[in-house]
Amino acid sequence: MPTTSTTTSTTTSSIRTPLGVEILTCEETPARLPGQGHPHPTHRLLAQDGGEYLFVGLLATTTPPDPRPLALPLAPGDICFYDARHTPVLDFPERFRATVFLVPADLLGLAGTDAGRIVGTPVARASRLGTLLSPLLSDLARAAAEARPQVGEMLAWNAVNLLSTLVTEQLGGEAPNPAGARSPMLARLLEYVELHLTDPDLSPEVIARAHHISVRYLHKLFKDEGTTVGRWILRRRLDECRRDLMRHGRGSRTIAAVAARWGFLSATHFSRVFRTAYGMSPREWRDTAGRAASAGRN
């Protein structure tokens, strides 16, 4: 777990989400950046002016630290990524403010050598994205610390989404995760859907709220998969109903009971969408599957 007691002044705000994202705002003179290990012996961050600096500590990275010496000059408002296992040494003025986002690398889609490419490439406050995101990230950090826990967690996830945008930009506009691989967030969303398929109240709003993301961002993730949230849920429910009808056959469970078990509130609606998907009614499918099973036993 990241430590937060590595400053000479008190941490004025701190929030941690269930998936391990932590946001800290340190006033006055941080002695070093929060991390999980010892400072890197040859990586230094340099600044001449006071003000606020934004840092993104990457947790659980898999690439070894770069052994080459590195000295990065920073200006107030710059956003700098660093490896939280080997935090860089700070060469800063006597007084400055630090807003630190500690984020598991996989939540930003970083894999393989991508984390190493991000560390050491600060986003200048004067750049196009820096001008837009630096003050926004700063405001989100403070608002998250002052808000109610549930709202604070949602704000923290909004900050993670913005940082993912920065990562994509820093990698040259390329998707950071390997080709064909689902993002870690999408994998969690799909797992959640699987665990709650039988809940008739399962909806985009419920899913987004459970993962502290916006409904808009949820829809974007599924759009990247070439589908929608509603279509994915419907398809998975129909798949399970089809298996149930094939397994149990006639007499063991009614079609309406199978539909209700997998979250369909209306048997009529279930029959309609089943026919649209498979070209036959649920009863026809059950009878056809039953005859095939009987033939296989004879």
Image (cartoon, helix red, strand yellow):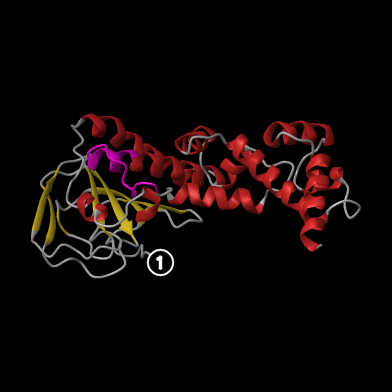
Question: Is 188 left or right of 251, judged from the image as shown?
Answer: left
Magenta-drawn stretch, dominant element (helix, strand or loop): loop
Residue 248: name its quadrant: bottom right
**Residue type of the residue flagged with mark 1:** Met
Residue 174 falls inside the magenta stretch:
yes
Q: What is the x, y in percent for residue 243?
A: 72, 51
Position of the C terminus by quadrant: bottom right
Relative height, residue 131 to residue 120 (above, below): above
* Residue lying farthest to the right in this orientation: 251
Q: Is residue 210 left or right of residue 266?
A: left
Which residue carries the number 1 mark? 1
**In this rendering, position of residue 282 left or right of residue 191:** right
| Total numbered badges shown on the rendered structure | 1
Residue located 89% across and 55% down the image: 252
| Camera-nearest residue between 28 and 297 | 297
Q: Residue at x 53, y 35 (%)?
A: 227
Q: Nearer the viewer, residue 38 or 27?
A: 38
Q: Which residues are magenta?
A: 165-180
Given the current orientation, which residue lies at the most extreme bottom position?
38
In the picture, the quarter occupied by the N terminus is bottom left
Q: Whole-percent x and y of residue 109?
A: 36, 49
Considering only vertical position in the picture, is 102 above or below 39?
above
- Residue 219 lies left or right of residue 235; in this view the side is left
In the structure shown, which secondary structural element does the residue marked by tag 1 occupy? loop
Q: Is residue 198 visible?
A: no
Mark 1 neighbour class, 10 Å CA radius: few under 14, some 14 to 19, many 20 or more: few
Please tell me which residue is depicted at 73% across the width and 47% down the height of the picture.
242
Q: Nearer the viewer, residue 182 or 204?
A: 182
Residue 17 is situated, as x and y percent measured from the top left of the image, at 48, 53
- Residue 183: tell me if it is visible: yes
Is residue 151 on the magenta stretch?
A: no
The percent coordinates of residue 177 (x first, y second) are: 34, 48
